[in-house]
């Protein structure tokens, strides 16, 4: 899914992630955020890796935006964009996407 400059992807148990997708995830589903303005081959053409969270952390009932990295002001999502992310994650978890 793409929102603003970010590519957002779900990583499930058994899914590949990390630089060059060299790691295999074990456990609860995660979500990763990439800045698509930067194309780094090591991140499989997704953009510059920014941050990763467990999905349950972002679906804890919070509302509002999200700062992905404090030192980089443009790496944040507005409340409206985070609502779209939460809907994507909720549907993805329900549908196994």
Image (cartoon, grey):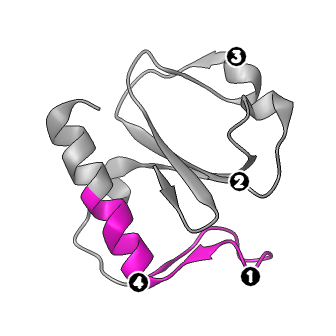
Crowd around label 1: few <14 · some 14–19 · many ≥20 (10 Å): few
Pointer 2 or 1: first along the chain: 2
Residue range in magenta is 65-87
The residue under the point 74% across, 82% down is 73
Q: Which residue is mark 1?
A: 73
CA gap, disc 4 and disc 2: 20 Å
Pointer 4 or 3: first along the chain: 3
Q: Which residue is mark 3?
A: 22
On the image, the x and y values in percent for residue 16 come to 56, 20
The residue under the point 34% across, 67% down is 84
Q: Nearer the viewer, mark 4 or mark 2?
A: 2
Q: Is residue 91 located in the magenta-colored stretch of the structure? A: no
Q: Nearer the viewer, mark 2 or mark 1?
A: 2
| Disc ID at residue 79 | 4
Q: Quadrant of the C terminus?
A: top left
The residue under the point 23% across, 40% down is 93
CA gap, disc 4 and disc 1: 15 Å
CA gap, disc 4 and disc 3: 33 Å
CA gap, disc 3 and disc 1: 29 Å
Pointer 3 or 1: first along the chain: 3
Pointer 2 or 3: first along the chain: 3
CA gap, disc 2 and disc 3: 20 Å
Pointer 4 or 2: first along the chain: 2
On the image, the x and y values in percent for residue 66 come to 50, 75
Q: Residue 42 falls in which quadrant of the image?
A: top right
Pointer 4 or 1: first along the chain: 1
Q: Which residue is mark 2?
A: 36
């Amino acid at each position: 899914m793409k929102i603003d400059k970010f590519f957002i992807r779900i990583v499930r148990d058994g899914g590949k992630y990390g630089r060059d997708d060299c790691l295999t995830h074990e456990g609860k589903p995660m979500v990763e955020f990439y800045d698509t303005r930067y194309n780094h081959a090591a991140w499989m053409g997704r953009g510059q890796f920014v941050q990763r969270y467990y999905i349950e952390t972002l679906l804890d009932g919070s509302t509002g935006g999200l700062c992905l990295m404090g030192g980089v002001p443009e790496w944040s999502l507005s409340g409206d964009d985070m609502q779209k992310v939460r809907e994507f994650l909720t549907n993805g978890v329900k549908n196994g996407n």
